[in-house]
Amino acid sequence: MKLAGLKSIENAHEDSVWAATWVPATEDRPSLLLTGSLDETVKLWRADELDLVRTNTGHSLGVAAVAAHPSGIIAASSSLDSFVRVFDVDTNATIAVLEECLETIWNL
């Protein structure tokens, strides 16, 4: 049996993708795909066509994990720079930046 992808995006990130999760839909928008990469960025994609919605920057080393709140309103990314960035999904406004030891942030 061979697994076939439904859709792929070439060069979606400038380096390897290490993390991905679904951001639940809200009343104002559909669900999104959230990806984190060694290229130090977090990207939000429309789930249906994989259209890029936004690129989030702010980490100085590769993104190791991403997570979304069940409400779909906030999300977080952790990086090899030892920081966790919590942000508003729709506005990209930073809600909090937490510094932790590297072992703690590998998985949000």
Image (cartoon, rainbow, N blue to C red):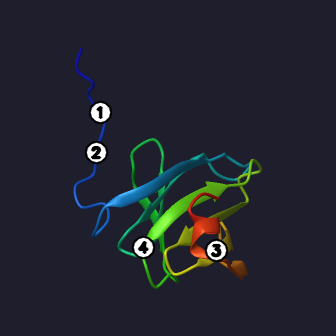
Q: Earlier in the sequence, mark 1 or mark 4?
A: 1
The structure residue drawn at horizontal position 47% and vertical position 55%, both measured from the top left corner, is 19
Q: Residues within 10 Å of mark 3 (few under 14, many from 20)?
A: many
Q: Earlier in the sequence, mark 2 or mark 3?
A: 2
Q: CA distance from mark 3 to mark 4?
A: 12 Å
Report the front residue among 108 and 68. Answer: 108
Report the front residue among 65 and 50. Answer: 65
SS at badge 3: strand
Q: State the residue position of label 4.
A: 62
Report the front residue among 90 and 84. Answer: 84
Does residue 12 appear to the left or right of 98 in the view shown?
left
Q: CA distance from mark 2 to mark 3?
A: 28 Å
Q: State the residue position of label 1.
A: 5
Q: CA distance from mark 4 to mark 2?
A: 22 Å
Q: Are marks 1 and 3 in contact (CB under 8 Å)?
A: no
The structure residue drawn at horizontal position 39% and vertical position 45%, both measured from the top left corner, is 49
Q: Residues within 10 Å of mark 4 (few under 14, many from 20)?
A: many
Q: State the residue position of label 3.
A: 84
- The image shows residue 95, relative to residue 105, as above or below, that is below
The structure residue drawn at horizontal position 64% and vertical position 75%, both measured from the top left corner, is 85
Which amino acid, by three-letter code, is at mark 3? Val
SS at badge 1: loop
Q: Are marks 1 and 4 in contact (CB under 8 Å)?
A: no
Q: Position of residue 43 (x, y in %)?
A: 46, 64
Q: CA distance from mark 2 to mark 1?
A: 7 Å
Q: Residues within 10 Å of mark 1 (few under 14, many from 20)?
A: few
